[in-house]
Amino acid sequence: MEPILEVKDLHVSFSVRGGEVKAVRGVNFTVGRGETIAIVGESGSGKSVTAQTIMRLIPSPPSMIKQGEIIFNGQNLLAKSNKDMEAVRGKDIGMIFQDPMTSLNPTIKVGKQITEGLIKHQNLSAADAKKRGVEMLKLVGIKNAEARFNQYPHEFSGGMRQRVMIAIALSCQPALLIADEPTTALDVTIQAQIISVMKDMQQRFGTSIIMITHDLGVVAGMADRVMVMYAGEVVETGTSMEIFKNPQHPYTRGLLRSLPRIDQRKDEPLVPIIGTPPDLIKPPIGCPFAARCDHAMSVCEKIDPAATHLSDTHMSRCWLLHPMAQEVTTS
Amino acid sequence: MSQPLIEVEGLKKYFNLGRGNILKAVNGIDFSINEGETLGVVGESGCGKSTAGRTILRLYEPTAGSVRFNGTDIYKLSPSKMKAMRRDMQMIFQDPYASLNPRFTVTDIIGEALDIHNMAGSRKERKKRVEELLDLVGLNPDHATRYPHEFSGGQRQRIGIARALAVNPKFIICDEPISALDVSIQAQVVNLLQDLQKRLGLTYLFIAHDLSMVKHISDRVAVMYMGRVVELAPSEELYANPLHAYTKTLLSAIPVPDPEIEANKKHILLNDEAAGPIHSKDGAPSQDLFNLDNSQLVEVSKGHWVAM
């Protein structure tokens, strides 16, 4: 698949009073055309920072992009001026945020919020933009779209607001959609609706999606590929099948084990991952997961493991996959 | 199982929204909870599950109905008797960031409960009891002098649990105790709650919207929709054999962390704008998708109740 986005060795830090929080530490990945990639990880793993850096949405200071390149359609987004970025945001890359209650402007009618981008990026007349905006509302499954077009966000329920967000994000038919926890604030039945709307829109427009979430169930239902982040690093990537059926990193395995599943019997106790993630002001020199890992060896605390490629698509960073480690564990 | 510890009968809680509009948050629910049992309550935002929890603890005065604790109707108790009763009934809240006073040390947060109920004789005894409780919930007793901001989300939730346990309650309502926590931390807190239940013989009402977690922790599960219980059954039975249309919708919407199952699953979609619990003054109810106004809970097989 032809990559539409390529992130190379991205490092992002935040300056805080105690020093420098190294939130993203050397992230590499590509997104193919029409592909859905999910970024999974817990709070503070750097997944949202990575996504917001692609959109260049985090203010600097306090953030600093220390190193790396983000190549989108052949251009390095990190080299663009703020003014040039404005032409990319909303037009080539759309974004949906977690909380549909706060990400719409409460004082502006939803119609105007949808057409704003169309008028700016596609030079449509107000009348054409309205026509297109109403069409978008219909596409995302909002009934009575003409009337709803002139309503304010508070007149919509949470799920409906998230549909409006999707309509705004996709109105200019961007090549890439970044969805940052798009269903976390919603109830499960509404979540199922929003996911089906996103899949439907992806098929219609061929949009690539970067989906950020901590819900592994949502990932299984949507993603072609999965990227597991921990403490600012990508610890494992693979196709959904590889990640769910054959996870190789102890953190990925731990995440899957700590989840109760609706399709399993309840007698087995949950296996939690002990401890908490490391402090990224002073990230560990070795593997960031070593302190919480059941299989940690002395090398894990000293040297951060390099990537081991198990297939063309499956990568994991763990010392257990090193050829010499096998001998140690079996002896 | 033994004697019911909690018996809820015909419980209603309405909120007056002004201009004659009434929000029927809890609209007639009945169930009982046996001693040592966990009853899970699931449902979506606005279904009345949290209001039900708070009304059962008499944090809200009910509009109608009764709640009996060990046979005593708690709504008939005088304020001073009610205060004594609160020793036996405690609550753990959803947001461990908002439910702990940021200006109190951990000792004071947990000790406050002991002070209110005159359970700590001397300062020394109070300190000892706080340290015992911290140890019980898996926190380091040396951290008793710290403030909430010095703890992570999971640790704060443990402080919340220690506070609830301080007065030796028999019954604890857990209102979404893990929704604000990361996946890897959720399992830690759930295991702690289960372990405490075994050691102290606690009875739980576990309110959540995460149906997989509710299934895991509960003996029986009640599904709420628009202020009513639409289905109540032992948890394995409910998930294996859901009977009410709403329960089926809810269960079909839960994503399973397995790409093969997800690829072959059919979702039942519900029109989310159809229903709401607000009743306007002209008496016209909002759309009643499942005709709940005319239905009653019927026991279809042993312990499995459905609104019909």
Image (cartoon, coloured by chain):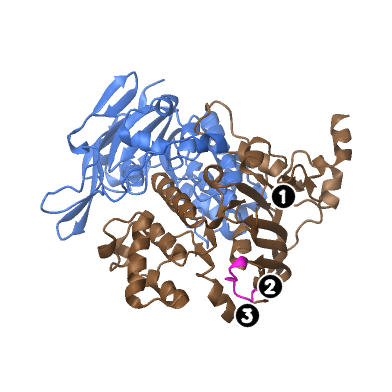
Subunit that carries the residue with mark 3: A
Q: Earlier in the sequence, mark 3 or mark 2?
A: 2
Which quarter of the rendering shows the C terminus of chain B? Answer: top left
In x, y percent, where is residue A148? 28, 63
Point out the frontmost of discs 3 and 1.
Answer: 3
Secondary structure at numbered mark 2: strand
Report the Cα–Cα distance between label 3 and label 1.
Answer: 32 Å
Question: Residue at coordinates 55% horizontally, 42% vertically from top-left?
Answer: A220
The image quadrant that residue A126 belongs to is bottom left
Relative to the observer, which residue lies in front, A152 or B21?
A152
Report the Cα–Cα distance between label 3 and label 2.
Answer: 15 Å
Relative to the observer, which residue lies in front, A203 or B221?
A203
> Which range is magenta?
A54-64
Q: Is residue B146 visible in the rendered structure shown here?
A: no
Q: Is residue A59 magenta?
A: yes
The image quadrant that residue A240 belongs to is top right
In the picture of the structure, the residue carrying the numbered disc 2 is A64
Secondary structure at numbered mark 1: strand
In the picture of the structure, the residue carrying the numbered disc 1 is A235
In the picture of the structure, the residue carrying the numbered disc 3 is A81
Q: Is B121 displayed left or right of B9 in the figure?
A: right
Relative to the observer, which residue lies in front, A279 or B131?
A279
Q: Earlier in the sequence, mark 3 or mark 1?
A: 3
Q: Please name the amino acid that badge 1 sits on.
A: Val
B114 in relation to A118, above or below: above
Q: Is A122 displayed left or right of B292 in the figure?
A: right
Q: Please name the amino acid that badge 2 sits on.
A: Met
Chain A: what color? Answer: brown
Point out the frontmost of discs 3 and 2.
Answer: 3
Q: Earlier in the sequence, mark 1 or mark 2?
A: 2
In x, y percent, where is residue B172? 43, 39
